[in-house]
Amino acid sequence: MRASESPFLDAESAWSSYRPYSSPNCCGERGGEPVRVRVEGDSMRPALLPGDWLLVCRRARVRPGDIVVARLPGDRERLIVKRAAWHGEDGWWLESDNQRASGRRDSWDFGPVPELVGRVVLRYWPPRRRAR
């Protein structure tokens, strides 16, 4: 399903509704309006699990180690959730936490990403995880 067919964007590791929350300043003045993202796939296990919902702040400051959302190079309609490893002259190097995940794609496959959608600031659903 493509973005034109649904309010959600098709994504390898995330879906985004791009509907801001009622409080546009919850990400601070610099962060802009937040974006809701739903995790799909196993590439960010154990930090994030399929079905987790995240709050992403656009224009928020990103540091190495932060979890971020970016557009998949070569398919700008798809989003990916990855960990920002480092920033170089060509952009951010993004890595999966679970390198053995089926279908995993990150900067080891496509190189640095010049622009990020935003930084994950909160996993808000499910409210609690059961011990595994």
Image (tube, rainbow, N blue to C red):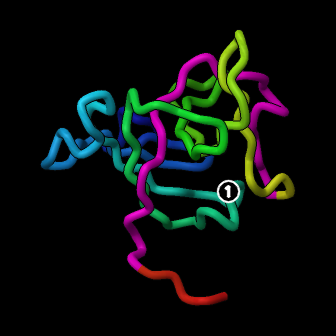
- The residue located at (23%, 42%) in the rendering is 20
Q: In which quarter of the image is residue 9?
A: top left
* Numbered range of the magenta stretch: 101-127
Residue 32 position (above or below residue 114): below
Q: Where is residue 44 in the image (x, y as percent from the top left)?
A: 67, 56
Q: Quadrant of residue 87?
A: top right
The residue closer to the viewer here, 82 or 59, is 59
The residue closer to the viewer here, 94 or 27, is 27
What residue occupies the far left of the structure in this picture? 22
Task: Examine the structure image and report whether residue 99 is included in the region drawn in magenta.
Answer: no
Q: Which amino acid does label 1 sit on?
A: Met
Q: Where is residue 99 in the image (x, y as percent from the top left)?
A: 83, 52
65 vs 29, left or right, is: right
The residue closer to the viewer here, 125 or 66, is 66
Q: Quadrant of residue 53?
A: bottom left
Q: Where is residue 90 in the image (x, y as percent from the top left)?
A: 70, 12
The residue closer to the viewer here, 50 or 128, is 128
What residue occupies the far bottom of the structure in this picture? 131
**Callout count:** 1
- The residue located at (59%, 44%) in the rendering is 66
Residue 17 position (above or below residue 109): below
- The residue at which mark 1 appears reads as 44
Q: Is mark 1 on a helix, strand or loop?
A: loop
Q: Where is residue 132 in the image (x, y as percent from the top left)?
A: 67, 88
- The residue located at (77%, 31%) in the rendering is 107
- The residue located at (74%, 48%) in the rendering is 96
4 vs 65, left or right, is: left
Mark 1: few, some, or many residues within 10 Å (few <14, many ≥20)?
Answer: many
